[in-house]
């Protein structure tokens, strides 16, 4: 049985801590508060699920952590996002460039949003390595081939020369996972990573994420509306409703005696 957040916190400080996060959007109808005082901790080697119905603020929370809110409408109006002693809310843009994709990876809901249709898989993965790991293009391509093999893509030395549209949906999502894990991040944020895939491929992708977590030890923040995925994957869970945390705790406790319908 996984330890409670309190137990793990006593042993191991959180790798990521969100404190009283408030995110707003300026719309034609006025200012909308999409995330309202959200707090949670994520620990190394553990998976925190953020679950809730569509529009509850799950994805906005993720994009707030990564500082990827649509501009100029979206802004973080309050709170802190502490990572490695740095408040990501106030961190300089240059620092965020190094953290985003390097120390914190993100797996997007729709692979074609994350992949550029006019560049080969190899070029896109190489760019991640060139930004964060090496200045040698040949080494970057070799690293790209290695990470594609690690996420279960057959003939990776051939796939690096292909374009996103030449791959199946499941293979594209494996490429997105490879991009997120390329620099061995401390935290991976996965925003509905299996929604666009059929059930069999969903199970394979979730199993892959668990295998890679065991091997690499990163923390995962898994955003989903699927309680089955939460039960299968997560140690701890945050239930969001209307931009707020309705309840939070170890998965077993929340599932055994939920206070939110």
Image: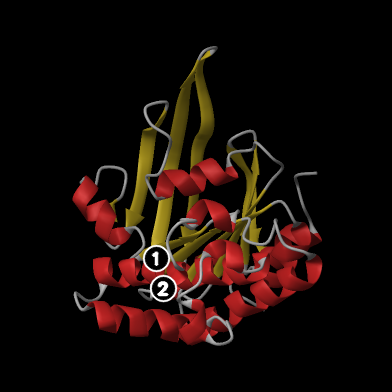
Q: Which residue lies furthest to the top in this view?
A: 29
Name the residue that disc number 2 marks: 122
In the figure, is residue 16 to the left or right of 206?
A: left
In this view of the protein, which residue sits in the foreground, 30 or 9? 30
Q: Is residue 41 above or below residue 81?
A: below
Quadrant containing the N terminus is: bottom right
In this view of the protein, which residue sits in the foreground, 83 or 118? 118
Q: In this view, does 181 lie above or below 215?
A: above
Location of residue 39 in the rendering, given as x and y in whole percent from the top left corner: 48, 47
Give the label on residue 73, or none: none
Name the residue that disc number 1 marks: 124
Location of residue 95 in the rendering, given as x and y in whole percent from the top left corner: 22, 54
Q: In which quarter of the view is residue 245 placed?
A: top right
Q: Element under label 2?
A: helix
Residue at the spot x=51%, y=66% of the render?
163
Q: Is residue 83 visible?
A: yes
Quadrant containing the C terminus is: top right
In the figure, is residue 109 to the left or right of 33?
A: right
Disc 2: CA contacts within 10 A as few (<14), some (14-19) or many (>=20): many
Disc 1: CA contacts within 10 A as few (<14), some (14-19) or many (>=20): some
Asked whether the beta carbons under mark 2 and mark 1 sit within 8 Å of each other, the answer is yes
């Amino acid at each position: 049985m996984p330890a409670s957040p309190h137990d793990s916190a006593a042993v191991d400080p959180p790798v990521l801590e969100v404190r009283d996060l408030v995110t707003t959007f300026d719309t034609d109808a006025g200012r909308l508060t999409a995330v309202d005082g959200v707090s949670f901790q994520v620990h190394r080697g553990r998976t925190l699920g953020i679950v809730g119905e569509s529009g509850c603020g799950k994805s906005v929370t993720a994009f707030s952590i990564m500082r990827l809110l649509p501009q100029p409408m979206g802004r973080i109006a309050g709170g802190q996002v502490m990572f490695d002693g740095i408040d990501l809310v106030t961190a300089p843009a240059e620092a965020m460039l190094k953290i985003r994709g390097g120390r914190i990876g993100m797996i997007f809901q729709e692979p074609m949003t994350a992949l550029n249709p006019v560049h080969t898989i190899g070029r896109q993965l190489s760019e991640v390595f060139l930004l964060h790991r090496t200045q040698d293009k040949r080494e970057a391509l070799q690293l790209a081939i290695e990470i594609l093999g690690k996420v279960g893509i057959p003939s990776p030395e051939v796939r690096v020369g292909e374009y996103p549209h030449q791959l199946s949906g499941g293979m594209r999502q494996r490429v997105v996972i490879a991009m997120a894990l390329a620099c061995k991040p401390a935290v991976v944020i996965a925003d509905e990573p299996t929604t666009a895939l059929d059930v069999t491929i969903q199970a394979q992708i979730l199993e892959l994420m668990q295998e890679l977590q065991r091997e690499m030890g990163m923390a995962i923040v898994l955003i989903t509306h699927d309680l089955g995925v939460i039960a299968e994957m997560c140690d701890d869970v945050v239930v969001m409703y209307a931009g707020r945390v309705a309840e939070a705790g170890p998965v077993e406790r929340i599932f055994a005696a939920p206070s939110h319908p």
